[in-house]
Amino acid sequence: MARYIAGRLLQAVVTLLGVVTIIFFLVRLSGDPARLLAPQNATATDIARIRHQLGLDTSLWSQYVHFLSQALRGNFGYSYVQDQPAMHIVLSRFPNTVELAVGALVVALGIGIPAGILSAVYRGRWPERTLMPLILVGQSMPAFWSGILLILVFSVRFHLFPSSGQGGLRALVLPAITLGSLSLATIARMARGSFLEQLDRDYVRTARAKGASGMRVMFGHVLRNALLPVLTITGLEAANLLGGAVLTEVIFAWPGVGQLTVQSVNSRDFPVVQAVVLLAAIVYVAVNLLVDLLYGVVDPRLRLTGAAP
Amino acid sequence: MSQGVTDDQVPAGQDPVLAVEDLSVCFEAGRQLKALSQVSVTVGRAEIVGVVGESGCGKSLTALSVMGLLPHNATVTGGRVVLEGVDLGSLNGRQRRDLRGRRMSMVFQEPMVALNPLMRAGRQVTEVLSVHSLLSRPARKERTLALFREVGLADPEARYRQYPHQLSGGMRQRVMIAMALAAEPSLLIADEPTTALDPTVQSQILQIFLDIRDRLGTSVLLVTHDMGVIAEVADRVTVMYAGRVVESAPVSEIFHRPAHPYTAGLLASIPARNADRGRAEDLPTIPGRVPALGEITAGCPFAPRCERAQTRCLQEEPGLLAAGPAHLAACWYPLEQDRLPAPARSET
C-alpha cells in the first residue's frame, strides 16, 4: 500500500512539472504585461524599465529556470498587479471556491443519485420519463444562461436569494445550483446506468431468494455495489469544481479562484495565473489519489489484493 | 448408493411438500413465447427429486417459478404451485416474500456471482436470520457459525469474516448452502449447484444434500443437466424437454427402464456408463437440437430428433401416460422391455 502511494506521488510530481511548464510558456504567448501596466503615455524606455523590474527582459529559458528554482523553494513570485505573493492571493480565494464546490456537489449528489436510482428502479415509467428529460435540460443550459435565469426569477422577481456576492448559505444557493446542475446530469446518468446494471446481477436474485424486502435489497445490497462507478465520476467532478468555476463565479461575482483566473489572465498577471493553474493541478491530482484510496475502502476486492484500481 | 425413499413409490399418505401442477410460463418478447407447458412436479417430505434436461428445457425456469423469482419478461399463464398445502398464487407479494428463505430457499449455480461481492460471507448468512427470525445479533452469529460447521466449512470464524473473492468455489457454494439452510426451510431448490465445481468438490457438495435430507428431513428439488448427479442423490427424476415434462419416475426406473426415447438418449450419452466401450468419440449423441421457443409446432416436440417417430408423433402431442408403477412418460411409442439398455448402476 505504501509502495502504491509512493508510486502515485512520484507520478504526481511528473504531472505537476508538466502542467507548470506548459502554463509557463502559454501565458507568455498572451502578450506583454508591461504594456498593460504602463500608463497611457508611457515611453518605450518606461516600458522597458517595467519589463526589467518584472524580470521579463532576460531570455525565456533563463526566466523558466529562475521560475522553477524559486517554485521549488515555495516562492511563486509576486503579483504584477497587487503587491502580494501570487500564491498568497490564490490561497486567500481558495476557501470561497471550496465553499462553492461543496455546495455544487451537495446539489449534484443530493439530487443526482436519488434521481438516478428512481430512473433505474422505475425504468420506462413516469419517474424516469420526467426526471431524465429535466436533467438533460439542466445539463444543456450553459451556466451563463441558467445562472442569469435563476437570478431573474429568484432574486429579481421573488427576492428569495441574493443575486451576487458571497456570505452565508442564502448567497450560496443560486451559484451552487447553477454550477451543480452540470455535474448533476453526469452523476444521475452514471447512477442510473450503474443501478440498472447491478439490478440484473445474480446476487440481487439471491438476496430476493432470502426473502429480503425491496428496500433491503436496494439499500443493503445494490446501493454499495452501484455507487462504485459513481464514486469515480464524483471524484472527477469534485476535482474540476475545486479548480474554480470561471463562468459561475463571474456571473454571481463570487470571489473565488475562477474569478481570479479571469482577472489575472486579462491583466497578464503571469505569476498569479501560474499559481492558479498549479493549485488546480495539485487539487486535481490529490482528489484523484484520494478517490482511488477510497475505492479500496469501499471495495474489498481492491483492498486486499493491494492492486491498483 | 443412497435411497432415502424406496424406489418404487411416490411418498403416499401425506401431502407433498411441493406440488407444481400444470404450470405454464410465457415470455413476452414482442409476442408470447411459451417457455413452460403444463409442467407438473411433486416433491415429498425428505425426498430429493431431480429435474433433468438439456439447457433451455425449462428446468431452471420451473425452479424460479416456484421461488416467485421469474425474470420481468416472464409470466405464469396457467397452473399452480402449492407449497405445504398453500397455493402460492393466492398469496400477495409480501406473504410470498415471507416464505422465501424461510419455507423454501434456493442455491444457485455460480456462487461467485450469486454472492454479494462487497459483503462478508458471515453477514450474507446472518441476513437470512435478520429477515426471518427474532434472534439477537450474537445469536445470529452463533447460528451462522454452527451452519458453517454443518456444511463442512473449516475454520468457520475466519470464513465468517471473509469476502466471497477470498473463498474457493467449493467454500462459496457451502456458504450459499448455509444461507439456504439458515431458516430451516422445508424445501431447498438447487439449480445446477455443482456444475461450476470440480468433480471432487462436486461429490462433497452432493453429500451435504443427502445429509440434510437425512438429518433435517429437508426436501430437495435438484435441477441439473447431469445424469451422473441424479444417479448419485435423487430419489425420483423428472425429465424435461422443450418446456414439458416428458418422463417422470423413481430413479432406478429411469436408469433401468426408461420409457421415453429422449431419456434413453440422455442415459446413453453419460460417459461413465460407457466407460467399457472405450474411446470417448464413441459416445452416442442425440441428433439435431432442442427447438427454440416459438419453434414448436404440432405433435411431439422431440419427434424431429427421434428415430422411433411415426406419423402420429408429428401430428398429435402425447400427454403423460402410465409406463409402469409411479412411472409416467409422454410418448406414443414408449420403449418396450426388449429394447432396454443394459443396467449400468451397480445395486448392492
Image (spheres, coloured by chain):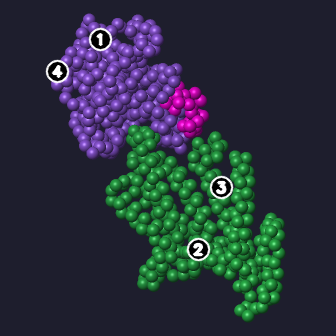
Amino acid, disc 4: Arg
Identify the residue at image location x=47%, y=33%: B110
How far apart are the alpha carbons under marks 1 and 2? 82 Å
The chain letter corresponding to purple is B
Q: Is residue A27 visible?
A: yes
Left or right? Give the position of A62 relative to B306. right
Which residue does the numbered mark 3 point to in the structure image? A289
**How many numbered marks are there?**
4
Q: Position of residue A120 (x, y in %)?
A: 40, 53
Q: Secondary structure at mark 1?
A: loop
Amino acid, disc 3: Leu
Badge nearest the viewer, 4 or 3: 4
How far apart are the alpha carbons under marks 4 and 3? 72 Å
Q: Secondary structure at mark 3?
A: helix
Where residue A246 is drawn, which disc sits there? Answer: 2
Q: Secondary structure at mark 4?
A: helix
Q: Which of these two is toward me, B294 or B221?
A: B294
Identify the residue at image location x=53%, y=44%: B118
Where residue B257 is drawn, which disc sits there? Answer: 1
Give the overall secondary structure of the magenta segment: helix
Mark 1–mark 3 CB contact (< 8 Å): no
Which residue does the numbered mark 4 point to in the structure image? B312
Q: Does the magenta segment cover residue B158?
A: yes
Mark 1–mark 2 CB contact (< 8 Å): no
How far apart are the alpha carbons under marks 2 and 3? 24 Å
Badge nearest the viewer, 4 or 1: 4
Mark 2–mark 3 CB contact (< 8 Å): no
Amino acid, disc 1: Arg
Tell me the magenta residue range: B152-176
How far apart are the alpha carbons under marks 1 and 3? 68 Å
Q: Is residue A36 above or below residue A286?
A: below
